[in-house]
Amino acid sequence: MTAVELIEKKRDGEALTANEIRWLIDSYTVGTVTDYQMAAMTMAVFLNGLNAEELAVWTDAMMHSGEVLDFDLIKKPKVDKHSTGGVGDKVSIPLVPMVAACGVAIPMISGRGLGHTGGTLDKLESIPGFTASLDRERFTSILEQHGLVMAGQSESLVPADRKLYALRDATGTVPSIPLISSSIMSKKLAEDLDGLVLDVKVGSGAFMKDEASARTLAKTMVGIGSAHGTTTVAYLTRMNEPLGHEVGNASEIVESIAVLRGDGPADLTEVTMVLAAEMLMLGGIEDSTDAANRRLEQVIASGEALELFGEVIEAQGGNRHVIDDPSLLPKASHRFEVKAPISGFVREVDALAIGRAAMSLGAGRETKEDSIDPGVGITLNAKTGDSVDQGAPLATLAFNDHDRAEAALPFLREAWEIGEAPTRQELIIDRIDG
Ligand code: URA
């Protein structure tokens, strides 16, 4: 078998056999298939796709390119959640302790923010002392002891994806449904899960701008999960405007704590509850949405979910007192208000523009090597459907560097559309299962 033969086959629209795919992924992982050959292959896949059998094998080969986790010793059901990424999307942070407080174990492996989308790990690492870099032993011991852990991908987990993602990023082959779905699912299926809930974001602030492609991505990932024997349910949720009022890192921790106190913004709470309830059902803890919602409301009202968040912060080296005292979190030194140019109703707050503004401020990173400034961010004072008077604040910028604030302003000035009252759009668009 040679790489050139396989590239030619895929270039000409033929399907690759299981052996060919496994050989290709293994050889690329060890370096005997070169970056330039794999670049040609990913472009051929980008153009010609993979059929369902090819995709299942491609994902499985990626998953087995490194260590596959084994949590047999953990007797609770293991369920995780993954979001395809958005702006202000801090759902995992309140959701994980809520679901874990109900008896589901969550070995969550998350990512960092890149481009206009934020990353759960960056938000968590704004908590003083908190680390998302855990070795296998510490990861498992925290999971065993507390029933939840939130960490980054180790070097040994799905190394094929680490190489392939960097290559795709440099060759214009990221937005391919088979490549995105195999990348996400190979990492999730390596977590030894009983169930998986996917939040596929749709809209200006998401990877998938339109509902049709988001639906195809969701169905493709659900199909991969089912082929692997892991019950997978996907939700299509709207990401035209940021979730919640805070876009940043430390500020999103404060907002997540509000959800855990039962006091979070309505949109963020709605998405968190829907996904959390599904996780309780996948884990066999409850058998109806109503029962799952009641259970989740109980662990919020009793303070168990918040207490568990404090426990996991401490177990991962962080200062748990942030849950009672937000002033312990990093804070930017300057504030600036963006004011409404006219009176009217907010028709739209463009998530992509807000995400770009946050990145300009230093809350996100343009390249993987950039560092982030955890205290900066944007507070949205007016969201879709709100009425505003001319001169009222639309957003408050928290910043440390005047040049960066200047760079963020043009994005913010174009983010709000003000006019007639808009018609309300549902946040949860659809549920897709196998
Ligand atoms: N997230 C991933 O992990 N992989 C992709 O290809 C896209 C988003």
Image (tube, rainbow, N blue to C red):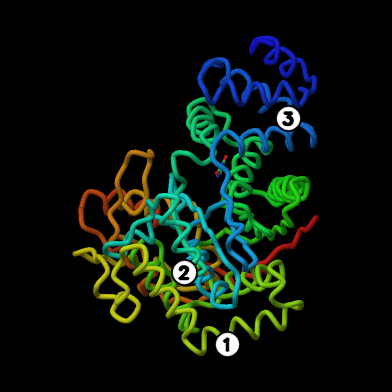
How packed is label 1: few (under 14 Cα within 10 Å), some, or many (20 or more)? some
Question: Can you name the residue that lies furthest to the front here?
Answer: 73
Pick the front one: 183 or 43: 183
Q: Which residue is drawn at 50% across and 27% down?
A: 167
Using residue 388 as the reference point, say whether residue 190 is left or right of it. Answer: right
Q: Which residue is drawn at 60% across and 49% down?
A: 188
Q: In which quarter of the image is the C terminus?
A: bottom right
Up the image or down, 148 lies above or below 411; here it is: below
Per the image, the residue denoted by label 1 is 298
Tell me how far mark 2 sits from mark 1, CA to CA.
22 Å
Mark 2 vs mark 1: which is more N-terminal? Answer: 2
Q: Residue at x 44, y 70 (%)?
A: 245
Cβ–Cβ under 8 Å for marks 2 and 1? no
Q: Nearer the viewer, mark 2 or mark 1?
A: 2
Up the image or down, 360 lies above or below 120; here it is: above
Ligand 1: quadrant of the figure: top right
Q: Quadrant of the N terminus?
A: top right
Q: Position of residue 296 (x, y in %)?
A: 60, 81
Up the image or down, 264 lies above or below 107; here it is: below
Element marked by disc 1: helix
Q: Which of marks 2 and 3 is in front?
A: 2
What is the tally of numbered marks visible in this picture? 3
Per the image, the residue denoted by label 3 is 49
Mark 1 vs mark 3: which is more N-terminal? Answer: 3
Residue 181's quadrant in the figure?
Answer: top right
Per the image, the residue denoted by label 2 is 145
Mark 2 vs mark 3: which is more N-terminal? Answer: 3
Amino acid found under the numbered disc labelled 2: Gln
Amino acid found under the numbered disc labelled 1: Gln
